[in-house]
Amino acid sequence: MQNDTGPFPRLAIVGFGLIGGSIALSAKRRWPATAVVAVDDKAVVDAALTSGAADQASDDLAILAGADLVVLAAPVLQNIAILERLPAVLRGSTLVTDVGSTKRRIVAAADQVPAVPFIGGHPMAGAARGGLAAARADLFDRHPWIVTPSPDDTSWLERLDAFITGLGAIPHIMTADLHDRLVAAVSHLPQVTASALMHVVGKLAGDAGLELAGPGLVDTTRLAASPAQIWRDIAATNDDMLREALDALIRTLTDLRNGLGNAESIDATFTSATRWRDALLRARGDA
């Protein structure tokens, strides 16, 4: 059994929103003696200290000195900029990981900062609302957590694996390229589609029309409440993969539009969707 401080006794999290705050709460749940350091804007770190999610906090990266693990939990492009500043702050015995939704850009950036040990990561968990107020200790329970190590990361990988498992998540190892291709399909495309759908429905129906909507629209557009600022970086750092996914969706929607009077066309798409929906539920253990 792990001791009360876990594999990383001093845990520093840069970006103390939904994901960063949930990592802190989950680590405290699993290893109560873990010292959690929060780095964010003053209002956020004050809230982190008041809530007990963090033991120390600052808006200055200097507080990261002495951390055993640094988790970059800001938007993707901010994480890259912060990573480039870390050699001036950290010693070689500190591992750095991130929780960004794209991996190729930050992994490439880490290659240019060899003094900082880095393993990319991405927990496949979240919520429609962001911010520290939405953080939960159980956010990662039974959810995949993708890890994108290089061949030279074996000495750190076991400890990071133990940390992720301790948070309740299930580690999955893959390349940064494969990660970005898969999440473009299973995460980024659903988000962009839900937001675009809600945008169009709102424009067509207006406030009065939305009063007639049933639970189907509410369920289908849950992701449309996601904050735009996070998705700007995701779209910018995975634009090629997301464009391919959107092109495939647009082709399908075009075929549906052109075949609205063709029962075979409707049946083919709906039958395929039902089969893949069943496969999704089985993969999640919900079938």
Image (cartoon, rainbow, N blue to C red):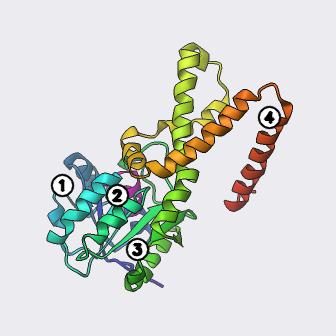
Residue 250 occupies quadrant = top right
Q: Characterize the local packing of mark 3: few (<14), some (14-19) or many (20 or more) Cα atoms within 10 angstroms.
A: many
> Earlier along the polypeptide chain: callout 3 or callout 2?
3
165 drawn magenta: no
SS at badge 1: loop
**Distance from the alpha carbon under mark 1 to that under mark 2:** 14 Å
> Earlier along the polypeptide chain: callout 1 or callout 2?
1
Whether residue 187 sits left or right of residue 73 in the image: it is: right
Q: Which range is magenta?
A: 15-23
**Distance from the alpha carbon under mark 3 to that under mark 2:** 20 Å
Front tag of 4 and 1: 4
Front tag of 3 and 2: 2
Circle 1: residue type: Asp
Circle 3: residue type: Trp
Q: Give x and y (percent) for residue 213.
A: 65, 23
Residue 266's label in the rendered image is 4
> Earlier along the polypeptide chain: callout 4 or callout 3?
3
21 drawn magenta: yes
Residue topped by disc 1: 59
Residue at image location 45% in from the left, 66% down from the top: 176
SS at badge 2: loop
Residue 245's label in the rendered image is none
Residue 73's label in the rendered image is 2
**Distance from the alpha carbon under mark 4 to that under mark 3:** 53 Å
Q: Give x and y (percent) for residue 201.
A: 58, 24
Q: Residue furthest right?
A: 263
Circle 4: residue type: Ile
**Distance from the alpha carbon under mark 4 to that under mark 1:** 54 Å
